[in-house]
Structure formats: C-alpha cells, structure tokens
Image (tube, coloured by chain):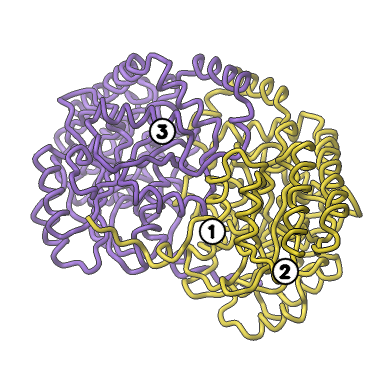
Chain colours: A yellow, B purple
Amino acid sequence: MEYKFSDNINSLKPSAIREILKTSGNAIPLSAGNPATEAFPEDYIIEITADILKNNAVTALQYSITEGYQPLKDEITYLAKNRYGIDNEGDGIIITSGAQQVMNLSAKAFCNSGDTVICESPSFIGSLNSFRSYGLKLRGVPMKPDGMDIDELEKALKESENVRFIYTIPNFQNPTGYTTSLEKRHKIYELAQKYDVLIIEDDPYGELRFAGEFIPPIKSFDTDGRVVYSGSMSKIISPGLRVGFAIANEEIIQKFAVCKQCDDVHTAVLPQMIAYELISKYDFENHIQSLKKIYKRRATLMTDLADKYLKDYVEYHKPDGGLFLWCTLPDHIDIKDFVKKALDNGVAVVPGFAFAVSEDEPCHSIRLNYSTPSEEQIKTAMKVLGDLIRKECK
Amino acid sequence: MEYKFSDNINSLKPSAIREILKTSGNAIPLSAGNPATEAFPEDYIIEITADILKNNAVTALQYSITEGYQPLKDEITYLAKNRYGIDNEGDGIIITSGAQQVMNLSAKAFCNSGDTVICESPSFIGSLNSFRSYGLKLRGVPMKPDGMDIDELEKALKESENVRFIYTIPNFQNPTGYTTSLEKRHKIYELAQKYDVLIIEDDPYGELRFAGEFIPPIKSFDTDGRVVYSGSMSKIISPGLRVGFAIANEEIIQKFAVCKQCDDVHTAVLPQMIAYELISKYDFENHIQSLKKIYKRRATLMTDLADKYLKDYVEYHKPDGGLFLWCTLPDHIDIKDFVKKALDNGVAVVPGFAFAVSEDEPCHSIRLNYSTPSEEQIKTAMKVLGDLIRKECK
C-alpha cells in the first residue's frame, strides 16, 4: 500500500549527524558526541549491578511508577540543591528516558501545533527535531560566546506569536561549546517574566566544566516556577542507560507524568537503580574530577592544535567544558564540499548547518568533538583539517 | 506563574488504574496487570547481566542506534518467523521502549490531529490515552468474545472521516481477555484493504496461551504491508526492562526511527542485551511453558471460584490465555460504588469504564487480574466479590 504519514513527520528529516555517522565508516570520529569510553565506571557498574539483582531483582524487573525510582529522585533532588543551588518551593522531579525525553515532554505538554519555540541559533538538532515533530515554529536567536544576543531575544519575543518557551543550553552549548554568562542568564529570566513564557534549561554538560568558575543555573533563581531544568546521566555516567530527569513545578511534573504514561509508561528500572547506586555510593565527586581531567586534556590538545594549524583561517572560541569546539571557516569555503573532502581524507566532522534553526541561514562552521577520538586521532585529524583549509585558502 | 498546557494534554486524564493503585494500599491487587513475580527468570538474569558487563560493557553503556541492538533485532525477527509465521518481504523491525512506545510512534507517524482511530471497545487505556495525546478521535467497535463486531467495524470505517488505522489486541485482549477468531482476523484485514487503512496489531499476551489452539496473527497474512505488529518482552521476561518492538514495512520502520530519535534517541542498551541473551541462549521455550503453567493454574482457580460465587449474577467468558477476566455485573449495580465497596472490603478491581472509548458509554463490568495476586489472595478476593454482589442483588 502507499503510506501517508502525518504532516509533522513528513516534513522532518533524519538527523544529518546520523547520516554522516552511517557513511563515515573508519574515519576519525570528530563527528560524534559520545562520552569517552574510558570514562565509564565499568568495574563499579559490574559490582553494583550484581548487588542490585541479587538483593532487589523484583524491583528492577517489575513495572514501576511513571515518575521514577524514588531513591534516585531523592538523590538527584539532593544533588541539585547542593551542587547547583536548585531548591525552589513547590518543585518536583521526574525521571525520564534520557534528557531527550524532557524536550519531547515539554513540546507535548505545553505546545499546540503552530506555537513558537525560541531557540539559540545554532542549537542541538535532537531538541530542534523534537519540537518540529509537534509542528512547532522555531525562531532562532543568534548565539554569541557569552550566550544569546539579548536584543535579538527580546525582538524574537516581541515579534513571535504564541511563544511557549525559550530553549537554552547554558553550559558548553551543543554545537558551539559557548557558555551563557550569569548576567545573560538573569536577563533571559527577566525577559521570560516580561513576556510570560517558560524556559527549558537543558544542562547535560554542566558537570563537565574544566576551566573557569561555576555559573548558577537559571533554575536556581526561578522564583516563579517558570523554568524546567533538564539534566542527564548520559555524559557523567553512561548514555546507553538512557536516564535523564526534569526538575520543575509539581503541576508541570504531574502533566509530564501523564504524557510519559502515554509515551513509554516509565523509564527502565535497572538503569535507574544503577544510576542511583553510582551517584549515592560511589565516590561520585572523584569520578567527576577524573572525567574533567580527561576532557580538559583532550580539549587542550585540540585547541592547541587549532592554534597551530587553523588559527590563520578559522574562528573558534576555547570552551570551558563540555565536548565540542565550534570552528567557523572563511566564507568562500563551501561547507558541504569541505565536510565531504574531510571524510575522503579520513576525518568525520559535522557541518554547522545540521544545527541550523532555519534551513536558509548561511552557515560556515563545523562542529568538532574531542571526547570520542583518542589523543592520537585528534593529532592526525587536526593536521588533516589544517591542510585542507590551507589548500582551500590558497 | 499560571501554566497553560496544550489542548491535547489538557483534556487527558491520568489513568484511572494508576489512581486506583495509588489508593489501594494493602488491598488484594486484582487491579494490576503485572506479571507474576515468581515468573521472572531472576537467577539467569543475574548470570547473563554479569557476563554482558564483563565482556561487553562499552556496548551496554555507550550510545547506540535508534533502531535497536542488532542481535536482538535478528533474534526477534527469527522468532516472529518461526513462532508466528511473520515473514513478509520488505519488512523491518525496530526495538522500542516497551510496546507502549509503538502506539505512541504509530499516532505520531501516521496521524494528524483530528484524524480517527478505530478501536475495540473497551480497550487498553494506555493505548487509548496515547492516541488521545495526539488529538485523535476514537471510534469504538463493540468487542465480542470472538473479536470485534464486524458489521459495526464496517459501519465505523464507512462513517468515520480520515481513519488512519484500526487498533486491535487480537489475543487475550486487555481488558476483556477475549481472543479474535481466525475468521474475524481475515475479515478485519479485508476491511482494512477495502477502506485502505492500516492495522496496529498489539500482541503483548500472545505467548501466554494456556488453552485452545494458536491462531496466526493478522501480520502473518499481510501481503500489502498494511499491518504494524507490536510485541513486548514485558509479559514474558520483565516489564521493568521496557523492551518492546514493532515489525512493519521498512518504510514505516524508517519513519518510526525518525520519530523515536525525537522521543528518546534509543532504548536503553543493557535491557536490550539482557533480552537478547535470554531469548537466544536461555531455554526460552521451557521458560514460556513454565509461565503458561502458572497463569493457567491461577486463571482456572479464578474462573472455578467465579463459577462458585458469581455465576448466578455475573457474565464472564473464560480466557484462553493472558492475564484478565472480564466480569459484567447486573445493570442495577452502580460500578463506581461497587468498586469502592470492594476496596473497603480489601479487594482492588478496575471499573470497566476506565477502558471505555467514549465516556458516555454505559458500562457494567469490572476487570479482574489473576497474574499479580497469589492463589490464597485469589481465593479470598473472589469470596469477597461474591458476597458483595449477592448483597447487591438481594
């Protein structure tokens, strides 16, 4: 038979990153966003998983409640208070199937088809596509090294109809690696108040700060219950477990639970229990420190090599944490063609337009990831990219 | 701030079953749909999980592909061919976060807001709510002990606008326990062809047949690629793992993958690997036989006691498998009041109207589950229900 798909889904394209990953074969993967394999606390996971199943198999295997495994909820609530200063009266928490599900639940719970979401431009494609899958209009606000252009944000809020929320990744944003300053965090919150919209604060990378000072999340000064704070175990424990969470006003959490009931009933229990044991009983602080060490080393290596090979032709801003370096090439270089040439030379990178809010935006950037490749691979790849760019600029 | 939720979600009520479970405390749980705890292959899961993490931790912990863990996909494809006769050219498979996600993906991929889904009436509330969460209209077709009323199904197809699919649970339906006959399965397929609509065939209980003969799924004679077959590990291995799957034409599977990418990226990997090891290396057939033995024993106990205590006042049809017995009480009994009285007497049951397609349908039934309570609990509960009904009929 001939299939007719929904209007929302028909217009959605598969992730450009996925397509690149599919064809990149043995190329050096500067294209992924995977945590470093050696960062997984494997031995400890083996030990605690055996304990969980030995002592508590029925809990791990039986149906559970939609809001999540209570000890994990309590532990994350405690951490969010003590590490990030998130402690607002009336807030609750729900465990999700990765932070991606928070974006899905936000679109589903808050938005009617045709409503507008204001996003940083560029932004994480997974979130943008999740919003698109509900027929939402995306309005991009240019991203600067210290966060969104605030004048443009106000313009977007003023000009757009039915804005439901502002979507921001304040720490080490994907794809730019940029971090929103405290001043801008306050301004974003004030504008959200002025125009009475919500903020979805997506913070999967916040724990991975290896330079500069901690900046409090917007959620920490959310007196109105206006912010949905989204966190994830993916970058600090393991993405394969698919455990994320949202902290928001209890009224929102209850709506999220109704939506999640329709989507996947609850998040797999064993991964939730593993995450709980890791956070509460493992030396979590020490684990985070060792992660930061790995990422700092790789990021420094990559930016040093950028200084050596790319500096004369390429703009970039050294990240204070996270997984990505965003490089803007000279205007005359065709990015699609460049990415293909890089791949032909054994290096996979993601073209910046994959993260564009609207397709017709010009984009001369590429996203480089330093968490997945080894140090040797980073050395080889940066030289290849440097040679290619120099050739294009002759 | 004052929250505004989406139109679709605002009109959605939390599952009535969840609400009952929340207040039922220590009552005997004839209200749940949980597999029997002693049915979990705990020891084997402990063993294989240790092996997986010892030999293959990085695969279990790293990001994976949206379509699922390849060995599990291959194994389920093989089982579906050999056990159910599902082997259509051009079909593919996607692993989902429980079968609930198949309903979510079907609504998302196929339907625009306002489209119609044709459902058995009554039907599984989780699926109905998933469809409602996309703003879909539900048209119910009365359920008989051998499946949908076919004349009413044709009437529904003729009268409804923009019908996208027929939703059916052909084996031991939730909540009725009824099984659709082979003849009716063919008629449903012919009507789907005549009116050019899809069929979502939801089969979580198919392996739990303890009486009567195997009936081939509609998918097994799907020459048009018109059927999405949904299966689940929840009732045969463990619901806490949240592993389900859909088998459908590859074009549909690819759209499901695009949607799932937006929803939760991929299903947690460790649960997929556990499911794979269990199905492929454990004595799966023996495990299924032992499950059937447990459920047959409990079902027989419950229906024998129904014959003893309820027969004169209550209509029911003995199930050939699955988890549920559907009991229709005399018209004069107010079901809401009866369910409350049962709870006051220590027995939790679900009122039939929780499964109604439209709220104004009259419903005089209750759903009894025999997989969760122990045999002793079933004995006590059935006597309590019998006493209550007799009192109401005096």
Q: Can you tell which of label 3 and label 1 is closer to the viewer? A: 3
Q: The numbered mark 3 sits on a residue in which chain? A: B
Report x, y in % for residue A291: 80, 38
Amino acid type of the residue that numbered disc 3 sits on in the rendered structure: Lys
Amino acid type of the residue that numbered disc 1 sits on in the rendered structure: Lys
Picture disc at residue A255: 1
Mark 3 Cα-neighbour bin, 10 Å: few <14, some 14–19, many ≥20: many
Report x, y in % for residue B78: 32, 27
Position of A322 compared to B103: left or right?
Answer: right
Q: The numbered mark 1 sits on a residue in which chain? A: A
- Furthest residue in direction bottom, as rendered: A159
CA distance for labels 3 and 1: 33 Å
* Circle 2: element type: loop
Mark 2 Cα-neighbour bin, 10 Å: few <14, some 14–19, many ≥20: some
Position of A78 compared to A157: left or right?
Answer: right
Picture disc at residue A224: 2
> Which quadrant of the rendered structure holds the C terminus of chain A?
bottom right
Report x, y in % for residue A66: 53, 45
Picture disc at residue B73: 3
